[in-house]
């Protein structure tokens, strides 16, 4: 299982489109995701005090785009990156943050 943080309005727009593309897909070539033990750090570093956040629970075996684990030198940890749009059926649960 991997996880992705998204705003509720952004997720609702993805549901209308039928797939999800984070802004990072256009700028960096992939969608940032995390392992469960990395979520708290990601929230603290990048989403502090942001309202209306959701945590997508993604079954990586259902992804249609390639998944690669790559080192983030700033925190010296490997993070999962999705190299393409996120197919909605790979999201098996959504929790409010």
Image (tube, grey):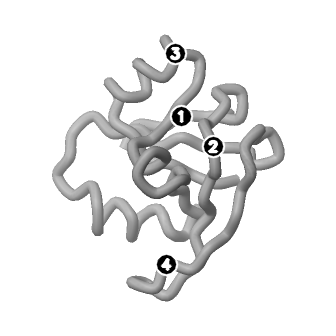
Q: Is residue 17 above or below residue 24?
A: above
Left or right, 14 with respect to 53, comes to right
Residue corresponding to mark 1: 94
User: Which residue is identified by label 2?
Assistant: 84
Q: Residues within 10 Å of mark 3 (few under 14, many from 20)?
A: few
10 Å crowding of disc 1: few (<14), some (14-19), many (20+): some
Residue 11's x, y, as percent?
43, 27
Residue sitting at x 36%, y 44%: 97
Compute the Cα span from label 3 to label 4. Answer: 30 Å
The answer to whether the residue labelled 1 contacts the one labelled 4, judged by CB atoms less than 8 Å apart, is no
- For discs 1 and 4, the disc positioned in front in the rendered view: 4
Q: Quadrant of residue 57?
A: top right
Disc 1 to disc 3: CB gap under 8 Å:
no
Looking at this view, is 29 or 10 the one in front? Answer: 29
The residue that disc 4 covers is: 72
Is label 1 in a helix, a strand or a loop? strand
Query: For the view shown, which residue lies furthest in the right direction?
Result: 61
- What number is the disc on residue 17? 3
Which element type, helix, strand or loop, lies under badge 4? strand
């Amino acid at each position: 299982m991997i996880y992705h943080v998204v705003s509720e309005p952004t997720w609702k727009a993805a549901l209308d489109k039928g797939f999800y593309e984070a802004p990072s897909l256009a700028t960096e070539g992939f969608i940032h995701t995390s392992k469960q033990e990395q979520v708290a750090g990601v929230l603290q570093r990048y989403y502090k005090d942001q309202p209306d956040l959701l945590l997508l629970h993604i079954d990586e075996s259902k992804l249609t785009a390639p998944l690669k684990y790559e080192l983030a030198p700033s925190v010296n940890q490997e993070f999962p990156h999705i190299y393409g749009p996120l197919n909605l059926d790979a999201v098996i649960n959504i929790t409010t943050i």
